[in-house]
Amino acid sequence: MVEQTVQIVSNERDTDLYFRLVVRAPQIAPLVQAGQFAHVRILPLREALLRRPFSIFQVSGSTLSILYKAIGKGTEVLSRMRAGEELSMIGPLGHGFSVPQPGGVTPLLVAGGYGMAALYLLAQHSPQKGIVFVGGRRRVDILCEEEFRALGWEVRVTTEDGSQGEKGFVTQALLTELKRGATGRKLFACGPTAMLKAVGRLAAEFELPAELSLDEHMGCGIGVCLTCVVPIKAGENWEYQRTCTEGPVFDSRRVAWEAIG
Amino acid sequence: MNLSVKIGTLTLQNPVTVASGTFGYGVEYAQLVDLNQLGAVVVKGIRLEPVRGNPTPRTVEVTSGLINAIGLQGPGVDGFIRKYWPFLKGLRVPTFINIWGTTVEEYAEVARRFDALGGVGALELNVSCPNLKAGGAQFGTDLKLLSQVVGACRRATKLPLITKLSPNVVSIVPYAKAAEAAGSDGLSIMNSFPAMAIDIETRRPSLANVTGGLTGPCIKPIAIKLVWEAAKAVNIPVIGMGGIQSTADAVEFLMAGATAVAVGTASFYEPQTALQVVAGLREFMQQKGVQDVRDLIGSVQTDK
């Protein structure tokens, strides 16, 4: 974990409200592992005090990139920042995905919308190439499928309105695939909580291991404020653990879904 | 140049500490902040048993502030000693342990446990958390209960005792005096303000707990006034806190009468804040030709 001032290399619109931010972060970039995040202070926000957490999408030498949707105060201001401007970044943070061993499990990745970004480094570092299932509401919510194809992965797209790929939920496409054969596979997922819960259910049904990257509202990002807690099984009961520190990636069997509202 | 100040029998190398609940147990910040440059490390509130804390959402960002209702999630005395004390006792600066309970007896028992531990810098009595059904602010907003809880802890330990007061009272003066009379060696002024925010899309409160405690820069002027009032009324040192995010903020608290200050919510968004304030304070004193930080304390001129 390092705090440094990073310079924006580029910050361009992808589709719709989605943007790709590339920053020069020479101290942070070399440390990044798959599934980790960066906590960003957007200085022009002023009276909105907190940092904003973003999954780290790609890493290249001393730069790293982030894929985000301009949907709130923070991301809207961020989307108007230009190359050369600076941000304060703490990273890499959190406990990411376990990259499969050579000859080990074949990964099946499941992403909802820009959850794709959190899975890219895992796909890049996995010795076995698998299938990535990506779902979104509309065509514009399907991001970076070309990047995954370029890694040699098969990408299966679903949209709720049928504007791209198969019509329906991403977990339906996953179910179809798992019915064909589940042995030797492992699920890795990032997306909305409802999707993660459905992936967790499928993992249990097919007796597959699954790692889920949970997205919780976050405060400090380094384990202090206890904002981003999720219920994790502990013995007979459950306890709150921190998405920013013990997570964001948790073994789906350990998540106490019954305690998530 | 002297930056050191005293709280009871304890000397701090500088007057800049951190606010309980905003700095975890110190170790979380160790990779980002040189803890040994602080005046003291102040840990999150601890009671006898582990505490699960409130459901989520637990915090909400508001204009220049944050409302939280964490519910004092924590490992309990034994969990703290096992998990965090080995790290904290290795620091060169004192650790203040913030303690709480749901009864006077529990407060005293927690105080005894930390007294017996050895090596603790001071105990900070949390009688002011607004997010608990039992314990916390009920002790800090009732003069009789406040005297009882401070008195019981006083009998339980020789460690410096600092009472962290609630701002949620008509006048802070009687509470400050009661804590002093019951044996407190210092006062932390203040805890968060009861507050609420509503999500207008869902018509639901922004916090699962419905209400929480407001912190951050938006509360600073209120805190300054409370510190100023309390510091005049007692002969024990006051640790001032509430929205400090810069050197200027800290100096303002000192001038209002605080002997030391605590950086709180600012550590969440800028972990270096407390250390920046230490450096900035030195610079400010140099510029103003102030040799001793104690010359700043209570130096506000209110007479015409």
Image (tube, rainbow, N blue to C red):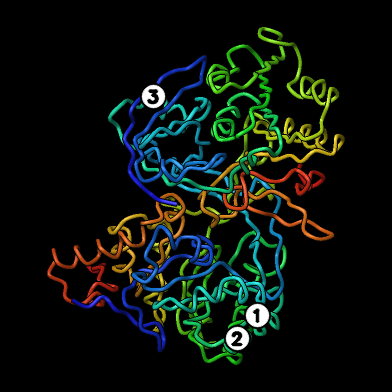
Residue B220 visible in image: no
Residue situated in front as seen by the camera: B268 or B190: B268
Q: Is residue B243 above or below residue B2?
A: above
Q: Residues within 10 Å of mark 1 (few under 14, many from 20)?
A: many
Compared with residue B193, is residue B110 higher up or lower down, i.e. above or below?
A: below
Instruction: Inspect the image, locate mark 1, and give the three-letter code of the amino acid beneath it.
Output: Tyr
Per the image, the residue denoted by label 3 is A11
Q: Residue at x 52, y 49 (%)?
A: A221
Q: Are marks 1 and 2 in contact (CB under 8 Å)?
A: yes
Left or right: A50 with respect to B38?
right
Which residue sits furthest top? A163
Check chain identity for marks 1 and 3: say if they share one.
no
Label 2: chain letter: B
Residue A35, given in percent of the width and then of the height, sits at 57, 39
Question: Which amino acid lies under the numbered mark 3 shown in the image of this protein?
Answer: Asn
Q: Tag 1, which secondary structure?
A: helix
Which residue lies at the image location 70% right of the left edge and 15% below the top edge? Answer: A158
Relative image position of residue A202 (x, y in whole percent): 82, 33
Kindly identify the amino acid type of the residue bearing the numbered disc 2: Cys
| B60 with respect to B187 (left or right) | right
